[in-house]
Image (cartoon, rainbow, N blue to C red):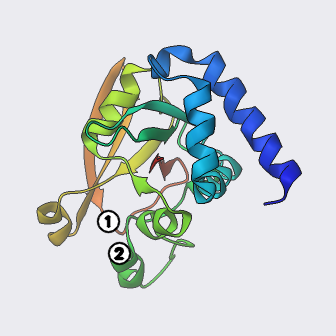
Amino acid sequence: MNAAQHEALLEVLKKRFEKHASRHEGVTWREVAARLAATPKALEVLAEMERTGGEPDVVGREGKNGALLFVDCAAESPGGRRSLCFDREALEARKEARPADAATAVAAAMGIELLDEAQYRHLQTLGRFDTKTSSWIATPPAIRKLGGALFCDRRYDHVFVYHNGAQSYYAARGFRGLLRV
C-alpha cells in the first residue's frame, strides 16, 4: 500500500468512525489512529475488508488487552465475499457446481476471523444488518463434525441463527469478519 492509498483509507475509516460514534463509545479516533500506526499490517487487512465491501468500523474493545475490535459494518453481508461454502473441507467435498472458495479460507487469507454468534448479536445491537442477506458465523466443532455450519440474519426485527450443510452456498450469503488491533 503506497502512502496515498494509506492516507485515503485512513480518511474513509475516520469519516465512518465519526459518522457512527454510537458504535464505539469511549474510543477516540486519536487512539484508533495510534493503534493503526503501531500495527501497519492491520491497515492492509482493513484495506482488504474495505475492498471486498465490508465497511469496517470499530465496534468495541476487547476486555483484558484493550484491543480495538474492527468488524464489517456494511448494511448487507459484504458483496465481495458471497457465494462461498463454509470451509475448505466442504469445498473439497463438493463434486459439482463448486463455489469459487470457502468463507473460512477467505477470512484466513485476509487475516480476519468469522464472527461468532455472540459477536454477531452484539453487532446487531449497533444497527440493522443483513436484512436482505445472511452471513456465515463461526460454527462449533460438534456441529461442523456432523456436516453442518451456522449462519445468521435479521428478519422481522429479530436476529436468527440457522443451520445449513457446510457445502451449501448462496448469492446472498457471505461472511462478516473481525480484526483485533
Quadrant housing residue 149: bottom left
Q: 8 or 94: nearer the eye? A: 8
Residue type marked 2: Ala
- Residue 141 vertical placement versus 38 (above, below): below
- Residue 154 vertical placement versus 181 (above, below): above
Cα gap from disc 1 to disc 2, whole angstroms: 6 Å
Residue in view at x 28 percent, y 33 percent: 160
Residue in view at x 34 percent, y 79 percent: 89
Residue in view at x 85 percent, y 53 percent: 3
Disc 2: which residue: 90
Which residue is outermost to the left? 142
Picture coordinates of residue 155 (x, y %)?
38, 25
Q: Looking at the image, is mark 1 or mark 2 earlier in the sequence?
A: 2
Residue 166: mark in rendering: 1
Which residue is outermost to the right? 4
- Residue 23 vertical placement versus 177 (above, below): above
Q: Are marks 1 and 2 in contact (CB under 8 Å)?
A: yes
**Residue 107 as seen in the image, left or right of residue 90:** right
Picture coordinates of residue 1 (x, y %)?
78, 60
Quick check: can you spot residue 3?
yes
Quadrant housing residue 162: top left
Picture coordinates of residue 63 (x, y %)?
27, 36
Residue type marked 1: Ala
